[in-house]
Amino acid sequence: MANDKQFPMTAAGKQKLEDELDYLKTVKRKEVVERIKVARSFGDLSENSEYDSAKEDQAFVEGRISTLESMIRNAVIINETEASNDIVRLGKTVTFVEVPGGDEEAYTIVGSAEADPLEGRISNDSPIAKSMLGHTVGDRVKVLTPGGEMEVKIVSIN
């Protein structure tokens, strides 16, 4: 499938996805199958909310397994140590301030598969990361966000 989407991620991010996939296949899948068996034993399936719920969970688990397999198969590992700290790129932690007078913020730019803003990791597809990619320390960058335009100054890249 030559047109599968590639998923840039760190080696740790790929490992996290592989661990989740293993859990879903070895533990969660079996739990859901057991719930379906128990729900079937209640009799009439047409009015069996336990059965419906278990089938919905099964569909979710199987969909997530399929998604994870695709992401892992199409993973492109970011070599964080290879790239210099001169330019904002995937795998780098960027510290910036909103101009004028904003607080300093720092985020690591990662692929969408491992983005977690609450953990300080933003997707390379996010408006702020897209705007900063390719820039250097000291650059002022305009960021188009859903809330309007803002300007940030890049303080450091690690």
Image (cartoon, rainbow, N blue to C red):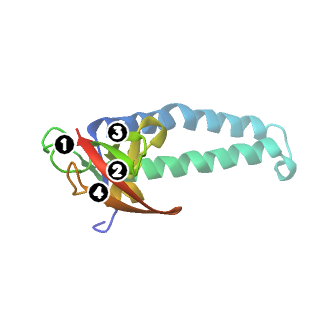
In the rendering, at what x and y percent does residue 40 appear?
A: 77, 41
Comparing labels 2 and 4, the label whose residue is closer to the camera: 4
Q: Disc 1 and disc 3: Cα gap in Å?
A: 12 Å
Where the N terminus falls, by quadrant?
Answer: bottom left
**Residue 117 visible (yes or no):** yes
Q: Residues within 10 Å of mark 2 (few under 14, many from 20)?
A: many
Residue in front for this viewpoint, 60 or 92: 92
Residue type for callout 3: Gly
**Residue identifier under label 4:** 140
Residue type for callout 2: Gly
Residue type for callout 1: Asn
Q: Residues within 10 Å of mark 4 (few under 14, many from 20)?
A: some
- Asked if the residues shown at circle 1 and circle 2 are in contact, with their CB atoms under 8 angstroms apart, the answer is no
Q: Disc 2 and disc 4: Cα gap in Å?
A: 23 Å
**Residue identifier under label 1:** 79
Q: Earlier in the sequence, mark 1 or mark 3?
A: 3
**Residue identifier under label 2:** 111
Quadrant of res 82: top left
Q: Which mark is residue 13?
A: 3
Residue type for callout 4: Arg
- Which residue is at 18% across, 42% downward? 79
Q: Residues within 10 Å of mark 1 (few under 14, many from 20)?
A: few
Q: Earlier in the sequence, mark 3 or mark 4?
A: 3
Residue in front for this viewpoint, 118 or 112: 118
Q: Does dot 3 land on a helix, a strand or a loop?
A: helix
Q: Does dot 2 land on a helix, a strand or a loop?
A: loop
Tell how many labels. 4
Q: Earlier in the sequence, mark 1 or mark 2?
A: 1
In the rendered image, the residue lying farthest to the front is: 101
